[in-house]
Image (spheres, helix red, strand yellow):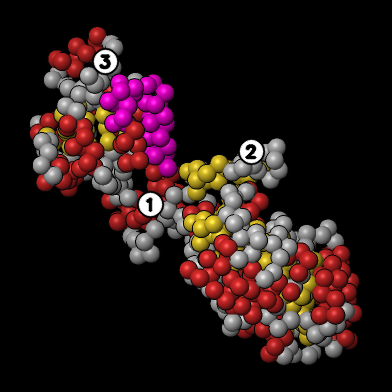
Amino acid sequence: MTSIKRALLAPYDKTGIEDFARELHERGVALLATSGTARRLRDAGLPVKEVSEHTGFPEMLGGRVKTLHPKIHGGLLGRRDLPDHVAQMQAHGIEPIDLLCLNLYPFRETIAKPDVTLADAVEQIDIGGPAMLRAAAKNHKDVVPLIDAADYAETLERLDSDNLTPEFRRGLAAKAYQHTCLYDSAIANYLASDSENGDDASAFPPTLMVGAECVETLRYGENPHQHGALYRIPGEGSLAACEQLNGKALSYINLLDAAGAYTTVAEFELPSAIVVKHANPCGAASHENLVTAFERAWEGDPVSAFGSILAFNREVTGDLAEAIAAKGFVEVVVAPSFSDEGLEILRTKPRWGKNVRLLKSELPKPDGMEVRSIPGGFLVQDRDAKATAAADLKVVSERAATDDELRDLVFAQLICKHVKSNAIVLAKDNMVVGVGAGQMSRVDAAGMAVKKAGDRAKGSVFASDAFLPFNDALQVALDAGATAAVQPGGSKNDEECIAFVNDRGVAMAFSGIRHFLH
């Protein structure tokens, strides 16, 4: 009735294995298993033969060697359609293995632990598992390779209907190789990163293994004529692993903007709200009360805020949801959590509630690597995790900045770090009042920020993502009423710039850190 006569079961993640094994047994399939799985199956009342009994060779070296034996690999790799293979298998007492159910040791989960040691990680490098998976996947014409409990049910259905087609087997084989590829990528990158070079650029591995799994196919990419998909790096959390609680399917641009907004809001310790439009913050504010922070963030640029992405670093409560619902249409709201009341309000109260995408995600970590594509390759760099506190600023002007100005200078620079270069930010009272983003000229960026701020530029502070080679951009902001400035410093014209602010009675600080963003 069936092409499956013997199955080898050796999954590390044993979810559903007893039920699956029972279904196989009831269909007349002989069960073969490694010791841990065999104990589980015997406890469930199932007849099972241990691998060590099958091979006539004991498990040894603390379990490092248990399946690396010709009776296992010959049973997986032997071709049933080649008389020579069949004859050799019979001569050596090698019985065919027709189905392999296996997944690998939890290496990624182990190295994600904050206190993991190299020795701990090495012990979670699976050897026999990948070898068996590759063997079964190579010989998928005769062997069904299963790595995912989600495929058990369909496999049983196809077994009953004698419909284990070449296409189905090939799909499972591809999945098996993807599994081993991701696994090997994690190991290679981990071992390569365990370097004595520290922060030195030479610590980048000579070969970067990029392993990711498709989460979903998107409606389209940046434009309707472009295809798009979301991939997630296994073991990584945050936005790529978010839980969508409401709304239409996410688009490519939704995800890019949500990433920009969420990365920005994660910078702040105070309750904060960020409004992003076309990859740039157009509004941002921090306040002890998150509803107040949102109201002030929205007022940063209420025209641009229509159709925007909102990000919060605290839970979206009922009160906050009421405030959001009272504003214009938004595309996405992303936060660490939503209260039941907040979720219900956003889903039902605004007329656009059924469509708004509500994303629950852990806050992104500032460190790690980022990868960006160029034609034919990738650029890889550390994430820009540098942040400046008030104590880190070097005041270079004759007039010292006030405490309020220092607070706003730090706030403005943090926002400026997430604005496309050339970037200028005006801020006041922990609130963005004007942004100039992505301009070819820094003086044009300053003019845009001043125009957005209007009368609110009076008493604001000015932040630039890079040093000021001339006084022109700064003059635009000071003429509009800015009273303090922060920039990295380092221009050959620094002394001229310092003399300029001293002449205007303005405070200026150097941060020593450039924050280009392209």
**Distance between the Cα atoms at labels 3 and 1?**
36 Å
Most distant residue in the top direction: 83
| Residue assigned mark 3 | 80
CA neighbours of label 1 inside 10 A, class few (<14), some (14 to 19), many (20+): some
Q: Is residue 369 left or right of residue 19?
A: right
465 in the magenta segment: no
Q: Residues within 10 Å of mark 3 (few under 14, many from 20)?
A: some
Going from the N terminus, do you reach mark 2 or mark 1 first? 1
Q: Which residues are magenta?
A: 155-182
Magenta residues, dominant SS class: helix
Mark 3 or mark 2: name the one nearer the start of the chain.
Answer: 3
| Marks 3 and 2, how far apart at CA | 42 Å
- Pinpoint residue 215: horizontal percent, then vertical percent: 50, 45
Q: Give me the disc on residue 227.
A: 2
Q: Quadrant of residue 481?
A: bottom right
Which residue sits at x=37%, y=35%? 176
Depth check: give the residue in front, 187 or 86: 86
Circles 2 and 1, Cβ within 8 Å, touching? The answer is no
Task: Residue 363 in the image: state x and y as whole percent.
Answer: 52, 65
Give the residue pinned by disc 1.
108
Residue 272 position by quadrant: bottom right
Is residue 198 positioned above or below 141 on the image? below
Q: Earlier in the sequence, mark 3 or mark 1?
A: 3
Q: Quadrant of the N terminus?
A: top left
In front of the other: label 3 or label 1? 3
For residue 294, above or below residue 191: below
Residue at image point 78% right, 59% down? 438
Picture residue at 65% right of the left edge, 43% below the top: 221
Q: Is residue 266 above or below residue 372?
A: below
